[in-house]
Image: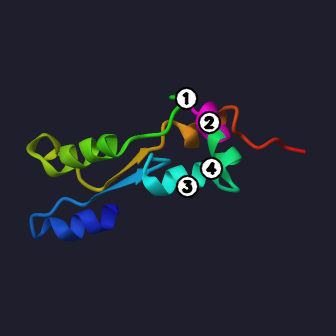
Amino acid sequence: MMAEAVRWDKRGARINAISPGIVITPLAKDELTGPRGEGYRHMIELCPVGRAGSPDEVGSVGALLMGQDGAFITGSDFLMDGGVTAAYWYGELAPTKP
């Protein structure tokens, strides 16, 4: 990501990524009621924000990155998973060690 930001800067581009967690879409609704749904629901319940994201929330970050307010942002990956990754490493979702 960072290397591409440097390379594409020559063309005036800013390179960023958005890495969303569970976002409530029709597909996510199917997943939440499917065979892995219990695991996904458990993950959502134990994440710091305690809920899934919305498409509008992801869109807001995209608008920031594409707009003038984000003109100083390049080479970044925006993890927006409600804190699931943090909970996995440091919270209640952390795997137990034998």
Circles 2 and 4: CB atoms closer than 8 Å: no
Task: Say few, some or many: other residues with alpha carbon within 10 Å of mark 1 (under 14 / 14 to 19 / 20 or more).
Answer: some
Q: Residue at position x 90%, y 45% from top? A: 98
- Tell me the kind of residue under disc 1: Pro
Q: Is residue 21 magenta?
A: no
Residue 26 in which image quadrant: bottom left
Q: Which of 12 and 53 is in front in this view?
A: 53
Q: Which of 51 and 97 is in front in this view?
A: 51
Residue 14 in which image quadrant: bottom left
Q: Nearer the viewer, mark 3 or mark 1?
A: 3
- SS for callout 3: helix
Task: Say few, some or many: other residues with alpha carbon within 10 Å of mark 3 (under 14 / 14 to 19 / 20 or more).
Answer: few
**Residue 72 x %, y %:** 16, 45
Task: Say few, some or many: other residues with alpha carbon within 10 Å of mark 4 (under 14 / 14 to 19 / 20 or more).
Answer: few
Between the residue at mark 3 and the residue at mark 4, the CA separation in whole angstroms equals 5 Å
Circles 1 and 2: CB atoms closer than 8 Å: yes
Q: Which label's residue is closer to the chain start, 1 or 2?
A: 1
Between the residue at mark 2 and the residue at mark 3, the CA separation in whole angstroms equals 24 Å
Label annotation for residue 33: 4
- SS for callout 4: helix
Residue at the disc numbered 2: 87
Circles 3 and 4: CB atoms closer than 8 Å: yes
Task: Please state the extent of the stretch shown in magenta in the rendering.
Answer: 42-47
Residue at the disc numbered 3: 30
- Tell me the kind of residue under disc 4: Thr
Q: Which label's residue is closer to the chain start, 3 or 1?
A: 3
Q: Which of marks 4 and 1 is in front?
A: 4
Residue at the disc numbered 1: 48
- Asked whether, in this view, residue 27 is left or right of residue 71, the answer is right
